[in-house]
Amino acid sequence: MNTDQLTNEAVRQAITALQTGDDERWFALFTENPELYDEEDKMEFRPFFEHALGHERFISIDKVENDGRDIYGYFHSDQWGDFKTYFKFYFNAAGKIKRLDIGQADY
C-alpha cells in the first residue's frame, strides 16, 4: 500500500508500523498512556493494539485531512472483515501521539 499521501511524518511512521505489525515501532510513537477511542468508546490502548497488530491493516488510504493527522481508507481486520475506517491522531507538545480515535467511516 502506498503511504506517499501521508504528509505527517509521525502518522506515516505509525501507519507503516501498523501495516507491518511492528509493535515496537508502533508503541514507541505514542505517549506512555495514550487514549484510544473506538467509535467514541474509550478503550485500553495497549491491550487493544497488542491484539490488533499483525491482524489489522489498511488496504487503501482514500483521503487525508487535518494537516495529515486524519486518515480515511479501506481497512482489513482478520476478525471483522473489510470496511471503511478513520484514524485520527492527536499529539502532545513533544510530538508524541497522545490520543487515537478510530471507527467506521461513511464517506
Image (tube, rainbow, N blue to C red):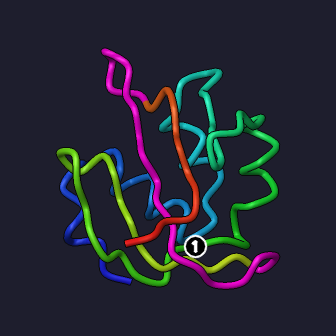
Q: Would residue 75 appear left or right of 33 to someone viewing this image?
A: left
Which region shows up in magenta? 78-96
Image quarter (top left, top right, bottom left or bottom right) of the N terminus: bottom left
Q: In which quarter of the image is residue 22?
A: bottom right
Please name the residue shown 51% across and 75% down the image: 84
Q: Position of residue 16 (x, y in %)?
A: 44, 64
Question: Which three-letter amino acid code belongs to the residue tagged 1?
Answer: Arg
Using the image, determine if residue 92 lies above or below residue 90: above
Q: Would residue 74 appear left or right of 13 to someone viewing this image?
A: right
Question: Outermost residue toward the top?
Answer: 93
Q: Position of residue 30 (x, y in %)?
A: 52, 33
Q: Position of residue 11 (x, y in %)?
A: 35, 50
Pick the residue in front: 85 or 33. Answer: 85
Using the image, determine if residue 91 lies above or below residue 106: above
Please name the residue shown 41% across and 28% down the image: 96
For mark 1, what is the residue? 57
Q: For mark 1, give the secondary structure.
A: strand
Image quarter (top left, top right, bottom left or bottom right) of the C terminus: bottom left
Q: Where is residue 10 in the image (x, y as percent from the top left)?
A: 33, 44
Say whether residue 46 is magenta.
no
Say whether residue 90 is magenta.
yes
Q: Quadrant of residue 20?
A: bottom right
Please name the residue shown 78% across and 51% down the image: 50
